[in-house]
Image (cartoon, coloured by chain):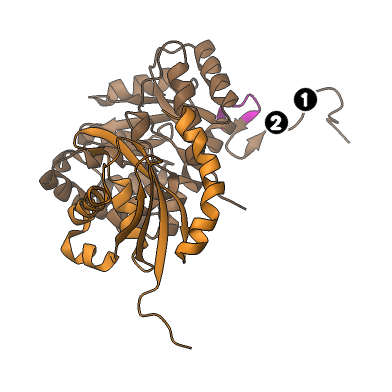
Chain colours: A brown, B orange
Amino acid sequence: MSRKFADLHVRCDIGPDGEGLRSITRRARLLGFSLLAIPLSPGTTKKRLSELKAIAEEEGIDLATRVDLAPTSRDELLSSLRRLRRKFELIGVLCQNKRVARVAARDRRVDLLSFSLEPRKRFFDRAEAELASSSNCALELDLMPLLELSVRERVRLLRRLRAEVALAEKGGIPIVISSGATEAILMRKPRELAYLASELFDMSLEEALDALSKRPLEIVERNRAKLSPDFIAPGIRLIRRGRDCPLER
Amino acid sequence: MPVREVRKRYLAIYIDGARPEKLDELEELIFSSLLRLFGEIGASKAFFKVISYDVGEGLAIIRCGHKHMGLIRAALAAITDIRGRPTALHVIDVSGTSRALRKRLPSRLADLRFIRGGGS
């Protein structure tokens, strides 16, 4: 069976009328993706979210709703999570300081951890990995912003990213590779992204492909199940309603 | 049976956005990306050459060593502009022989027309 690919971080402007989204989803489908997530404003209404999903579906793409948080304090993060968790299918947190990074890593409501492109402001160390391994957070790595850095900056960052990937693999933390594309022309085929990640981060090609297909799809599927009205608790869901359910034997 | 010292892979590439004007310019573009990401040792391992390039269609065929195809594909994905104008190089097919690749190319081009038409 062929793989289904997902890009969970397309940062393109979708425009007010949805034409931008239409063009991005069309391109994504032609490049070989079946699921896309575009960060939206936290204030986006549920009606607008359904409209965007419908537009993407017309183009043959499954759109996952995502919000990116960049809190500066623990309280700000927790309050945003309380407000937004039931509304969006994916929550990404850009960890700007160590305190936020630690809280985000151990909170089960956070799906994706991302860090600054400045190596000194990346807090994915052994302690962070241990916390993330006990919750369900994944480490998200955007590829296209890497290419916009100067050679010196990129060299320093790549050294750091290779260490983070090794740490995540050792701790069993899922790695999600995203394009991080800000324009449609920066989007690449999933296999090209996998080759790029595999060469830059010392991952095997199979792991890189999983980071673009299996891992992101698992996260979206898990969250959709949680957001479904049939969800009761992890491992328990309602399978049938109505009078025909025998209560006693 | 004699075995080739370096097995080759042929890649068909479609250039979306700004295009190099000549084959040499395309070769230089890919080579500089390869050199930037993997250095001289990586570039020497890749065993890479541009075989043909059609500027009008934006189609090129390049050759590389089978073992280090990943280097080339990573270098191609890392190219984002030509002289400041945005571009994207997409691998549309891979084959072990240039003849098989050219034979399959028309069917791959049919898919490409959609990218050209509406992918912006």
* Residue A41, position as x, y percentages in the image: 38, 17
Label 1 packing within 10 angstroms: few (<14), some (14-19), many (20+): few
Residue located at (54% from left, 54% from top) = B104
Quickly name the residue at label 2: A238
Name the element at disc 1. loop
Label 2 packing within 10 angstroms: few (<14), some (14-19), many (20+): few
Quickly name the residue at label 1: A241
The reply to whether residue B114 is visible in this rendering is: yes
Q: CA distance from mark 2 to mark 1?
A: 7 Å
Q: Which residues are magenta?
A: A226-231
Residue A243 lies, with reference to residue A164, above or below; the image says above
Residue located at (46% from left, 57% from top) = B94
Q: What's the chain of the residue with tag 1?
A: A
Name the element at disc 2. loop
Q: What's the chain of the residue with tag 2?
A: A
The reply to whether residue A102 is visible in this rendering is: no
Please report contact status of discs 2 and 1: CB closer than 8 Å, yes or no. Answer: yes
Q: Is residue A35 left or right of residue B22?
A: right
